[in-house]
Amino acid sequence: MNKKLFTLLILFLSSWGLFAKENANDNHPKPAPHQLKWHEAELGVVFHYDLHVFDGKIYGQGNNRINPVEDYNIFHPEQLDTDQWIRAAKASGAKFAVLTATHETGFGLWQSDVNPYCLKAVKWRDGKGDIVRDFVNSCRKYDIQPGIYIGIRWNSLFGIHNFKAEGDGAFAQNRQAWYKRLCEKMVTEICTRYGDLFMIWFDGGADDPNGLGPNVEPIVAKYQPNCLFYHNVNRADFRWGGSESGTVGYPCWSSFPYPYSHSNATDNVADHNKLLAHGDANGKYWVPAMADTPLRGYNGRHEWFWEPGDDDKAVYPLANLMEMYEKSVGRNATLIVGLTPNPDGLIPKGDVKRLQEWGNEIQRRFGTPLAQTSSENSKKLTLNLPKGQKANYYIIQEDISKGERIRAYRIEAQINGKWKTVSEGTSVGHKRIASFPETEARKFRLVVDECTATPVIRNFSVYQVAL
């Protein structure tokens, strides 16, 4: 063999040996394909709509859970336009949308053949309306991934309180069994009538199928194998981030110690909420974080449903929304924002305007980097700018199909020929967005100080953001 080729071969085998040794313990969890879609979406919305939107009263969750709406024909959104809903969501940059097909009243927003308490029962559209159908069609029209939220934990009409049929003896037991079967049939309808869905979301969970809860996970797995399931006591494809503030903690790891988000492993609620907010760097399961908040959460409000008199004072200012974005999407979580159709069936004008402003601001800040690079096998990446430029933000993204490998990093700027650290961090995951003191330099670099295997970095970029 040619001596030069032999030397190159030895060098290659040696370097491969080092690479193989470093990656031999690459056993961290990795996302399933549908979980990768969750990360890539980054931002979504959820539309809450129910009978009590039309009663002219401030929403009271406790009362709503136990007091049935006596006249369900108050439901009459005469200008209902789900296209308008989805256009507003898309303007914000949302990639998916979720509709509450049924919530705490038990009223269904589709043409159910198993739940008599649905749109078939009202005079609106001669009892032929199907808002789930309208919603899914609008999502597909505007290239938004559709998801459905099914609330089964409470049902004020049927007397279901925290999954349990109220009462004692054989009557309550029979009603409990009937309600479990009803829930399974409703889930089957949703899963089989509306094409592929991005997500099926059971608010408050679907409980334990061996106890009070219906056995819904096999139904979703059978008819919607590619959709996200959230959640019951056995499985959660993502986890709640521990608050409804639209933010998660930092660091925020996608790995988690259990295959579901709610566990009896700890009786301490504060400790468990901290775990939800941060995840576990050494967790064996891929259960990424969700940050959620209603758009109408300002001035002491927290409105998942439209309420009278708040159109001009409850919508978050743009600055608050950008802070949420950076502390959710920028911390490796997916952000879901609650939107509130009004009694006319429209998203209010002020809400639409703010969503457009938000989408524009995200693009203004992070749409065009000063410089950008990637690497499949390096712990150091350098950005070379054509001239000295001021920067104050960076974005890092790992190729999470290989898992989360980075455990500690720093960002450096070359100033007067010397490298100076301008920022440091731990978790990266799908996306890390962070600011640093405005610094002028021709070179910036990412240095990975700790990792569990060779980092695969799909994006390292810097930005100059005028604030």
Image (cartoon, rainbow, N blue to C red):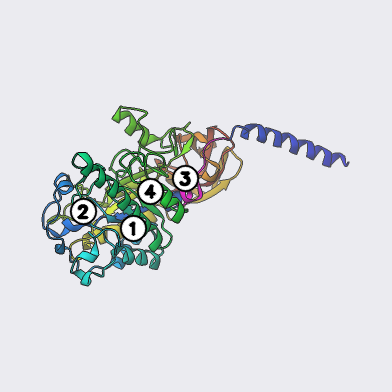
User: What quarter of the picture does the N terminus occupy?
Assistant: top right
Q: Is residue 35 magenta?
A: yes
**Range shown magenta:** 27-37
- The answer to whether marks 2 and 1 mark residues whose Cβ atoms lie closer than 8 Å is no
The crowding category of the residue bearing disc 4, from other C-alpha atoms within 10 Å (few below 14, some 14 to 19, many at least 20), is many
Amino acid, disc 4? Val
Q: Is residue 416 magenta?
A: no
Say which element carries label 2: loop
- Give how far across and how far down residue 213 sits, in percent: 32, 43
Disc 4 versus disc 1: nearer the observer: 4
Horizontal arrangement in the rendering, residue 310 relative to residue 17 (left or right): left
324 up-or-down from 253: above or below: below
The residue indicated by pointer 1 is 92
Decide which of tag 4 and tag 3 comes sooner along the chain.
4
331 or 306, which lies in front? 306
Q: Identify the residue at horizontal 43%, vertical 48% (top origin).
A: 218
Q: Identify the residue at horizontal 11%, vertical 54% (top origin).
A: 57
The residue indicated by pointer 3 is 430
Give the Cα distance between marks 3 and 1: 20 Å
Say which element carries label 4: loop
Amino acid, disc 3? His
Q: Is residue 361 visible?
A: no
The residue indicated by pointer 4 is 216
Horizontal arrangement in the rendering, residue 420 relative to residue 124 (left or right): right
Q: Residue 305: which numbered mark, if any?
A: 2
- The answer to whether marks 3 and 2 mark residues whose Cβ atoms lie closer than 8 Å is no
Decide which of tag 3 and tag 2 comes sooner along the chain.
2
Give the Cα distance between marks 3 and 2: 31 Å
Give the Cα distance between marks 2 and 4: 26 Å
169 up-or-down from 348: above or below: above
Decide which of tag 2 and tag 4 comes sooner along the chain.
4
Disc 2 versus disc 4: nearer the observer: 4
